[in-house]
Structures are given as structure tokens and as C-alpha cells.
Amino acid sequence: MRRHGLPEVVRGFKTYSGRRVNAMRGTPGTAVWQRGFYEHVVRNEEDLNRIREYIAENPLRWWLKREGESG
């Protein structure tokens, strides 16, 4: 049995799910996912909580940055 590294697994997931999303939307070939990803091993509860906080707050940071650039 061949083992696959995390980059290969993520690429496969993004390819499969992107095609399914585009099939449902009727938008073949349209980008669904951003390019690349940040790989990090969660080592403890503190690390997990920090990542959860980042994920929860990131949309607001993105919006504030975008608003600051347009104004």
C-alpha cells in the first residue's frame, strides 16, 4: 500500500471537492480554494485554542484590512 503525505492528501481533497462544488454551481473550472495551505501539527490544548481563536477572528481581520485599503 502506498502512503501519501499531507500535501498529496490536501491536494486530492481540494481537487475532488472543488470539482463537486463547481458541478453543483454549474461553474466548471472556477477556483474554489486558495492556492497552498499552512501545515501545522497541533501539539497541545493551548496550541489548539490559539488556532481556534485565529480561525474565529480571521474573517474580521480580513474585512478590516480590506476596508482600510479601500478608504
Image (cartoon, helix red, strand yellow):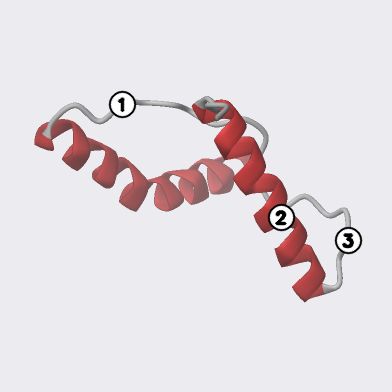
Q: Residue at x 28, y 38 (%)?
A: 51
In the image, is 21 to the left or to the right of 68?
right
Which disc number belongs to residue 18?
2
Q: Position of residue 49 (x, y in %)?
A: 17, 41
Q: Residue at x 44, y 26 (%)?
A: 39
Q: Quadrant of the N terminus?
A: top right
Image quadrant of residue 44? top left
As measured in the structure, the alpha-carbon distance from the residue carrying label 1 to the one carrying label 2 is 25 Å
Q: Which residue is mark 3?
A: 28
Q: Earlier in the sequence, mark 3 or mark 2?
A: 2
Tell me the SS state at disc 3. loop
Q: Position of residue 36 (x, y in %)?
A: 62, 30
Q: Earlier in the sequence, mark 3 or mark 1?
A: 3
Which disc number belongs to residue 7?
none
The answer to whether one can see residue 71 in this image is: no
Closer to the camera in the image, 28 or 59: 28
Q: Residue at x 86, y 66 (%)?
A: 27
Tell me the SS state at disc 1. loop
